[in-house]
Amino acid sequence: MSRQHVVVLGGTGFVGRHLVPRVLRDGHRVTVVSRGLTTDTRAALSRQASVREGDVHDTDFLANVFGDADAVVNLTGILNEKGDRGDGFERVFVGITESVIAAMKASGTPRLLHMSALNAGHGDSHYLQSRGRAEAKVRGSGLQWTIFRPSVIAGPGDGLFCRFDKLLGMAPVLPIARGHARFQPVWVGDVAEAYARAINDPKSIGQVYELVGPDELSLAQIVRLTAQARGRSRMVLSLSERLGRWQANIGELLPGKPISRDNWRSLALDSTSRDNGLPKLGITPTRVTDRLREILRLDTAPAT
């Protein structure tokens, strides 16, 4: 395996914090591109990785960073946007992807590994539609691309189990919209491993890998499992479509958007797959339900 220079956008994010040390273990040189590091994100970043701070929308800046790179990993993303027009998702998913592609062509960097999502380009969600348009840019780029489409990604500090864990700590009853929506949560370490293996495998060029775990769970089951893991007695109430839409309208206005209108639209499509890319890359999918204590960092007595 030849040593490569891998540039990672989004390297300080949830997946990036697992991917960067994994790629370093393969002996590659890693540069993390960031719009600005906080004290916490800098502390979490491996000292073996180089850091370049700047505007990820700036093609000239990116081309300079990509100068001697062999591969670029684009993990940039957001879960929610300000408002509900889709322009926030468009700017991050499509705009940054366009800048990355232009910079790679300018610098002669051949290899792009791109983060997308299951159901990209389908449904009415601004998030999923923007993901789909970004994928189209990658496919038409002429670069040596690989696209990854994970279901919801689980791990310590995630936006799934940990997010509901906080909500469950606030009240004995948690009403949820579209509790029937189904997911196959994929372990964050498996996602990082998929990227690492694809970097080293030329057979992955031109491939789209859907990444899912072995357990298919409804949203209501995910919430109940979260409560049970912490020893909480909670009622999880699945709302009707009308009440679920009302909850999303209210959640859109709350700090942190516990649920948004676009989340509600995304939940109309199950985030599942029968074409799991993990085994294709030689990875045995991790059962997320076996890792709940680790995900929730349950190193203290169970809550009541």
Image: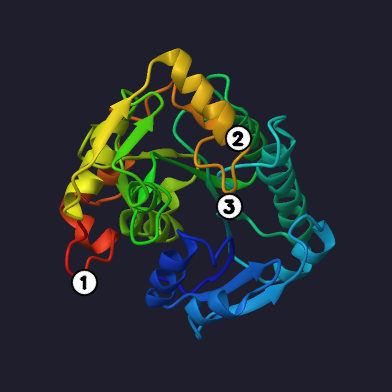
Of mark 2 and mark 1, the one earlier in the sequence is 2
Q: Is residue 210 left or right of residue 71?
A: left
Q: Secondary structure at mark 3?
A: strand
Image: 36 above or below 195? below
Residue depicted at x 57% and y 31%:
250
Image spot of residue 80 (x, y percent): 59, 42
Amino acid bearing label 2 = Glu
Residue depicted at x 76% and y 69%:
54
Residue depicted at x 30% and y 28%:
237
- Taking depth in this image into account, of 12 and 31 the one nearest to the observer is 12
Query: Quick check: can you spot residue 147?
Result: yes
Image spot of residue 156 (x, y percent): 34, 61
Q: Secondary structure at mark 2?
A: loop
How far apart are labels 2 and 3 at the CA level?
34 Å
Circle 1 residues within 10 Å: few <14, some 14–19, many ≥20 = few
Image spot of residue 172 (x, y percent): 28, 42
Q: Please name the residue that numbered disc 3 is placed on.
A: 112
Q: Quadrant of residue 121?
A: top right
Image spot of residue 181 (x, y percent): 35, 25
Query: Quick check: can you spot residue 141?
Result: no
How far apart are labels 3 and 1 at the CA level?
39 Å
Nearest to viewer (mark 3 / mark 1): 1
CB-based contact (under 8 Å), mark 2 and mark 1:
no
Q: Please name the residue that numbered disc 1 is placed on.
A: 299
Q: Name the image quarter holding the N terminus.
A: bottom left
The circle drawn on residue 252 is 2
Give the image's coloring scheme.
rainbow
How far apart are labels 2 and 1 at the CA level?
33 Å
Circle 3 residues within 10 Å: few <14, some 14–19, many ≥20 = many
